[in-house]
Amino acid sequence: MTSETNLTKAPTVQTSRVNLHFSVLIGMGLLLSVPCLIYGFPFYGDDSLSHAILYSQFAKQFWSGELYPRWLQELNAGLGDPTGYYYPPLSYWLTSLSRPLFPEDPNGWYQLGVSATVAVLFSGLTVYCWLIRTVDTSSALLASIVYLIWPYHLHTDLYGRGALAELWAFVWMPLILWMVEAVIRQRQLAVVGLACAYGALVLTHLPTTVVFSPVPIAYVLFFAPAEKRVSVISSTIISLLLGAGLAAIYLLPAMFMQEFIFHTTEGISGHYYFGNWFLFTGLTWTGRHSEFFMVSLAGILLAGLAFALARRSVTSNLQKTAWFWFVLAVGCFTMMMPLSKPVWDLLPGLQKIQFPFRFNTVLSVAAVSLVAFAYFRKPRLARLILISLLALFGTISLYATAVRAYYAYPVHHYDEPVNETAQKRLALKRVTNEFRPRWVTSVDEQPLDDLLTRIGMVQGELNRVRVVKGEASVAIDKWTPREIRLRVQSSEGTELNVSQFYFPGWTVKVDDAEARAAAPSKPGGLLQISVPAGNHQVLLQLRQRGPEFAGKIISGVSLIVLLALVAVSVRRRRRP
Amino acid sequence: MNADTMSKPRVVFVLRSRVATISVFLGLTLTGCNVRLAPADPVVDNLKLTHATGPLPDAAFKAQLSFAYQFPDVVSVNRRLNVNLLVKNLSQISWPFGGQRDGKYKVQVGNRWLDSSGSQKEDAKGELPYDLQPGDTAEVFMVITTPQTPGSYTLEFDLVQEQVTWFRDHGSATLSVTLLVQ
């Protein structure tokens, strides 16, 4: 893309204007997130409760010194949960930073609220920083405001779905495009910046990564100058690979240990089957999920109108840009409709994103880019038309968001059955079924209650070790997320059920014998161990499997390469 | 940039720089000192998730079912009951856990209620959690619904390959209990 517009700007004027625009965007972001700051993360969001349960345990283990909590020990009433192996950690890491500020927030509602607010603020800033590389500051500001109030971003993701990770993905997508611009212009450290931004996206939200990843590639293919195309494309691909490498610490276990949980197969049918969520068939004007339909339709309509104005740009380059984003927007919308089903059927990896409406993330980026170009260097009349359309769009969007936000909190709208269920889930820290280990038949409310009853309580707490065969006395010396130490005394040998769900990687070591893999109890799916007669020290450890170890190595190597690139760049800069 | 600088291999500089030293340290920290990997795990080695593409051979229809926990003798009418079963594959052929998208060929546990007059009513289904290898046992969870009319019933559990056959039709033993529904 050309830098012609930047060259015409007076740097001093631009700096002050950019600062002013930053203030406007920060102010707007704060205003739009006020409910999160007052009441915390939206309580009635689809995923809010899961986030509260998962995040609070993640943060607890993180602040106990476990930098990357994967096995969340206290979840499911203390039976443990492997969601940390599969759910991207970055949004929880970032949220964890606020934990010391909220000592009276055990379930993390306010910490999650602050995190959501910061995500909204930064999304406005990153989209602005990206767009001012190609359009003037006013156009960039206008588009950034549209991005902030974009219905799928605010109404749906924040206040409707409580989708914290996808909300953070809205920060990284424009950041990636900003860095891609820098790669095209062959700026110093652009490769490092792009790698970090892409790594952040992978570490934040895999479905958005899947739908967004082709965009940077297409962008450089389309916009890199012919004479630099090969080097720009290579740099972009290397950056993306380095970014994926940086995220390997999460990505490898999530990809290569999928068969250990039910999540792998739940997308094949039922609720998570992608075919149930197409626009005009699964989602329509009416019904429970009609909001996804309306939000998607509003998005493509605005993109179309903005394109109609943007394609009348003064330079062919800007027209080309407008066409690029319009084709992308239409492509995203098409992927949400039943006519794209053959594409979905061809790509099993894509089916794992579950909901075609997730293409709204990329649609929003494409649409705000079109808005920026629709405003940029346009005659007054065209700008007036655009502003009027955006005013109408903004009013409707903000009204819908305000209503959604109002009803997202029990203080305004007390839904007794939902609250009762939520309180029960919070008390037992019961997470959703999809990430449960495959050897555990169910962690739904009643079956888990039944299992807990069978395990029994000791002094008001869950019985941590139960003798299921023979007689034995057991003392617990250590009970931490990935390591449990027991002293077992038995006259004739015994079989014990340890109250942690079995998961591949759990090993058992009796005294100095070699560690061997633990086995699941049947029924129950708990850790089952046999201990011979006599006094023994038993060590249970959840050791890393190949993908976890390989992921760490690849992330470490990627980090070293990136730091080396920074060092080379700094050295070059210092050279006289 | 002069010729001398150009001729120096960059890698030397990278290794000498403090940033590189810190990055190596960080990398090693990240990879972790704990390199004790999990040993081989037969449970994982046996784990397969395949989908049946056709009827299983006759020799595959041999199963043993049992209640995982004690089951009541008396139940209330029209109640949902959680049932945990243990299912053992007594054949020499692996049972795939999945079937076709429409459910065809899927191996599941089903139950039916038989009253004293001989009439029967099919009820619920429970899925295998993974491919069940010969000789292996899996826990299957299902939610059944008791009849609406009080009386004495036989509750029978059996495996079925959807749209192919019930295992009992091939001589496999079912799990049956007599219950008083009141």
Image (cartoon, rainbow, N blue to C red):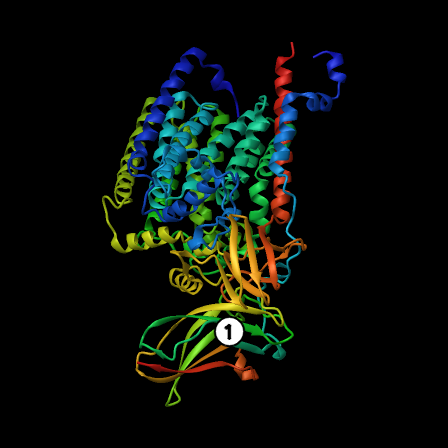
Residue A39: which quarter of the image? top left
Q: Is residue A276 above or below residue A110?
A: below
The answer to which of A14 and A550 lies nearer the viewer is A550
Relative side of B26 to A324, left or right: right
Q: Position of residue A258 (x, y in %)?
A: 56, 53
Relative side of A294 to B173, left or right: left
Q: Is residue B135 above or below residue B16?
A: below
One can see residue A144 in this view:
yes
Residue extending farthest bottom? B117
Q: Is residue A195 above or below residue A415?
A: above
Name the amino acid, label 1.
Answer: Glu
Q: Position of residue A574 (x, y in %)?
A: 62, 13
Q: Residue at x 74, y 16 (%)?
A: B6
One can see residue A151 in this view:
no
Q: How many marks?
A: 1
Which quarter shows the N terminus of chain B?
Answer: top right
Assess disc 1: are there few (<14), some (14-19) or many (≥20) residues with their C-alpha within 10 Å of its C-alpha. some
The answer to which of A44 and A80 lies nearer the viewer is A80
Residue extending farthest top? A576
The answer to which of A10 and B119 lies nearer the viewer is B119
Q: Position of residue A22 (x, y in %)?
A: 38, 22
Which quarter shows the C terminus of chain B?
Answer: bottom left
Identify the secondary structure beneath mark 1: loop
Q: Position of residue A480 (x, y in %)?
A: 51, 47
Q: Is residue B119 above or below residue A13?
A: below
Dot 1 falls on which chain? Answer: B
Q: Residue at x 38, y 42 (%)?
A: A157
- Identify residue for label 1: B162
